[in-house]
Image (spheres, helix red, strand yellow):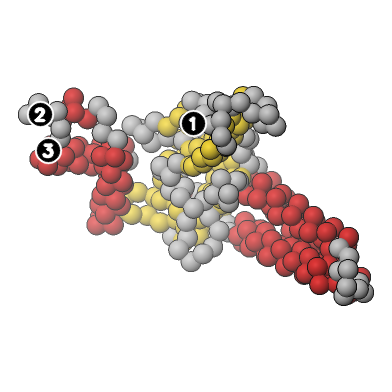
Amino acid sequence: MNRVLANDYRQGLTSIMGAVILVLSLFAAHIVIATSFALLAAGLAFFSWKSCYRRLRAIADTPSSRIASAAQGHVELIGTLRALPGFPLHGPLSGESCVWYRYWERRYTGIGWMRSAGETEAPFMMEDGSGACLVMPRGAEMTGLDPISRRKGNPRSPSKGDYEAMEWLLREGDEAHVVGRFSTLSGFSLDAFIDAQAAALFDALKAAPEGLEERFDLDGSGNLEAGEWKLVRSQTRRHVRRAFGDPRELHVIEKPADGRPFLLRRGEEGEASGSVSYRGWALFHVVVFLAALGSLPYALSKPWSL
């Protein structure tokens, strides 16, 4: 579930859970149940506050930089999102052109609900007027996204073929703020990075080879042989290098290896609105935490027997 929900929704969900558990502790008749619920609400609120605080500090303590002059390490970039040439993406539910998507769907089979969810990890570009940077979205916490909802039928009384679905998109031309690990690749490290991207694309093509036979089945056997797959691999690498502009160096921003947050917020006011969002959730978690601790004397005053 956490991979599907944007961080805004996760914070809302944990907030509701903490408040509900706190209310349950107030109405529980047994001392053990009431105390357990109060401690659980306090623990959930504490760890949720800690999560918000880490992200708030990551935004506040990370200086904004221009791509061309950004220092190597943890930075914030602000720019316009662009798709990589030759790597078109479309939302799986809406069919809308995008640079990144995440979706959640459930369909009624006649027996029960079948659920599916996922998101793309394909890279895309960010430009800020001074230069361009490749964004590797794997592991990023995406916020500021507007969900696209789809529904067929009544979920309370479903029929076969009914469904509910939600989709979140980053579109080409969107303004965004990214906080993550920035590095500039050149020479051997650039070649190794391009090889890794080409290998990932090659694996995807090999898993779904529809249409490749027409271009690469040189002997007309109807199947691609080892030598023909080698040609596919070579063409894939050239395609990836052309998509990156055949660069001498390449700027990349990605998830930090040291565990610091990797954040992407859509919108021109990404930093400001992100800070307000995390500050608001952190304050709510503090209130729930203090209320849970304050309810402990009341919980401990309840009888041992029902």
CB atoms of marks 3 and 2 within 8 Å:
yes
Instruction: Answer whether residue 124 is visible to the viewer in this image.
Output: yes
Q: Nearer the viewer, residue 83 or 89?
A: 89
Helix, strand or loop for disc 1:
loop
Q: Nearer the viewer, mark 1 or mark 3?
A: 3
Q: CA distance from mark 1 to mark 2?
A: 35 Å
Q: Residues within 10 Å of mark 1 (few under 14, many from 20)?
A: many
Residue 51 appears in which quarter of the rendering? bottom right
| Residue that badge 2 annotates | 221
Query: In the image, residue 83 lies at what x, y percent?
Result: 42, 34
Foreground mark, 1 or 2, reads: 2
Q: Which residue is mark 1?
A: 91
Q: The residue under label 1 is which amino acid type?
A: Gly
Q: Is residue 218 above or below residue 127?
A: above
Which residue is identified by label 3? 225
Residue 187's disc is none
Mark 2 residue element: loop
